[in-house]
Image (spheres, coloured by chain):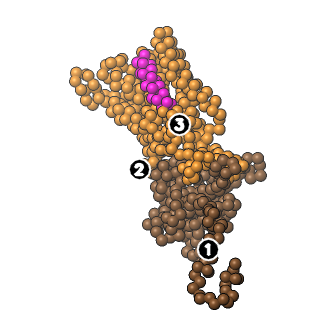
Chain colours: A brown, B orange
Amino acid sequence: MTQLALVIDLNVCVGCHACVTSCKQWNTSGWAGPMVDENPYDADPTGTFFNRVQTFEVGSYPNTETVHFPKSCLHCEDPPCVPVCPTGASYKREDNGVVLVDYDKCIGCKYCSWACPYGVRELDAQQKVMKKCTLCIDRITDQSLPEAERKPACVLACPTSARLYGDVHDPDSEVSIAIRERGGYALMPEWGTQPANHYLPRQKNRMHITEDDLQRVDNPLKKEDLTVYHGEETLEDVTW
Amino acid sequence: MHPAFSVIFLTTLLGAGQGLFLALVTGQVYSRIHLIEAQSSDYYLFGSLIAFALLLTGLVSSFFHLGRPERAWRTATKWRTSWLSREVIVLPLLMVLVATFGLIHWMGWTQPFVVAGEDALPVDASLLVGVFGALVAFALFVATAMIYASVKFLQEWASPLTVFNFTFFGLASGFMLAAAYSAFLGNDLVTFFGTWAVIFTAIAFLSRGASLLRNRRIKYRSNLKTAIGVRHQGIAQTSQGFSAGSFNTREFFHHRGPRTLTMVRSLFMVLVFPVPVLLIGLAYVTKSPNLPILAFLIQYLGLVAERWYFFAEAQHPQNLYYQRVS
């Protein structure tokens, strides 16, 4: 069975919010309907987003690292939001594992948002229905698009390629390889929701220079030199 | 969590309605087996009307919590998995049974079908509907409480104590209301219902006290380390990604200081438990017709505060992601 998901590389996310804006643009003008913004120019603006980039500081000054952390619906393998829905509006697609909301069935009771430990569902203030990341279901299943473009808007927009997209159940997919080889992990594993989206941890890229690296031990050319010399000018005279 | 008054009134009014119906059925069973004196049909008719009105008000109140109330009929479809759906089915069923119970008494269909023993237990239609209704009322307590108790990562709620609390608060306030109703009519059942109300209030005190103690020492399973998957002692959020409010900042936090919380807790601990018990005791001594009514009103007010605290106290792990604006 296919389980589509995003894998986010925390090594290269620079927190530019390109994924956030492209997500908003694509989804607000598409299948999901408008993602309403209220009081955009007032003191207390509020709006609906499927994707947010948050920033965390790890460590204590001056030894700190800034972690930009994009978060959207993780499309859990065992999504707690689905069974609690009293109308069946929240559902997980059988064919590709994407968790979606049927906006025509949703009654806006907010129970699914309580049941999601990640806080990735947002009630649309005007339409009064629950909204969430669709993994751009209308893009990724659109057969009329060239295959390279059948990806979520956030993945296409990311300037640093921090977002990988694919089937995490296919062991040979780009995302499965990245998870396997680079220690991809899920968020809040303690709740057993088994998120399909994974994150690739920061890697330490530190150079270790030892004394030996700085000292010239021997001339490799001299060592390998098997020529018999008869008083003529040698390579030695050039290199010393 | 954000305490919504629609849900506070829904749960407290339903509880009192269920409790009152259970009190009426208990009273009827006791009178049928000649332990207390029999009441007129009007007593049960108006009693079940009050219970029905409470259930109906609770149901109406629940609609204010919905974004799209016109689609509420859909909520009954997923009873296999959702406790909310189960509640939506059990509540109207109970309302039908309460209404039938009142109708039977109104129409006087109380001729016994069978009489067990020498007039020891006459079985009539109202007794059958009453006992079945009592079972449904308990099922509704479980369904309502499990909506909260089944959300496992809201650790304050995820406990059998939640179900006990909802049940015993409902029973206490319902029997208190039955005592108030009897006092208003001036009949002899005030002591009977008042005693049960005090017993249920005492059990509710133990149960709620236990959950308060439990919640005080909860060790939260989620923290910033598991939330973002970075293993480091010193993690602090510097930005939640936007600078103003959102659904996430409004729905999952009570937006009051810790002092308000402590105050509301002290308030409900006084209003729900000692004051009504004291008033019922005084009513017993003075034979006052007003004190039981006052006892119910004060306890109900306390229960509204208790339910507010119940929501405000719960810490949702999603708040880990929404701590800092920059």
Where residue B57 appears, as percent x and y from the top left, is 53, 35
Q: Nearer the viewer, residue B320 or B113?
A: B320
Q: Nearer the viewer, residue A77 or B309?
A: A77
**Discs 3, 1 touching: Cβ within 8 Å:** no
Per the rendered image, the range of residues in magenta is B191-213
Q: Is residue B204 magenta?
A: yes
Which numbered disc flags the more N-terminal residue, 3 or 2? 3
In the rendered image, which residue does mark 1 sit on? A218
Crowding at label 3, few (<14), some or many (≥20) Cα neighbours within 10 Å?
many
Q: Is residue B49 magenta?
A: no
Residue B242 visible somewhere in the drawing: yes
Q: Which mark is residue B80?
A: 2
Disc 2 is placed on an element classified as: loop
In the rendered image, which residue does mark 3 sit on? B10
Helix, strand or loop for the magenta stretch, by majority: helix
Q: Amino acid at mark 3?
A: Leu
The numbered mark 3 sits on a residue in which chain? Answer: B
Q: Nearer the viewer, mark 1 or mark 2?
A: 1
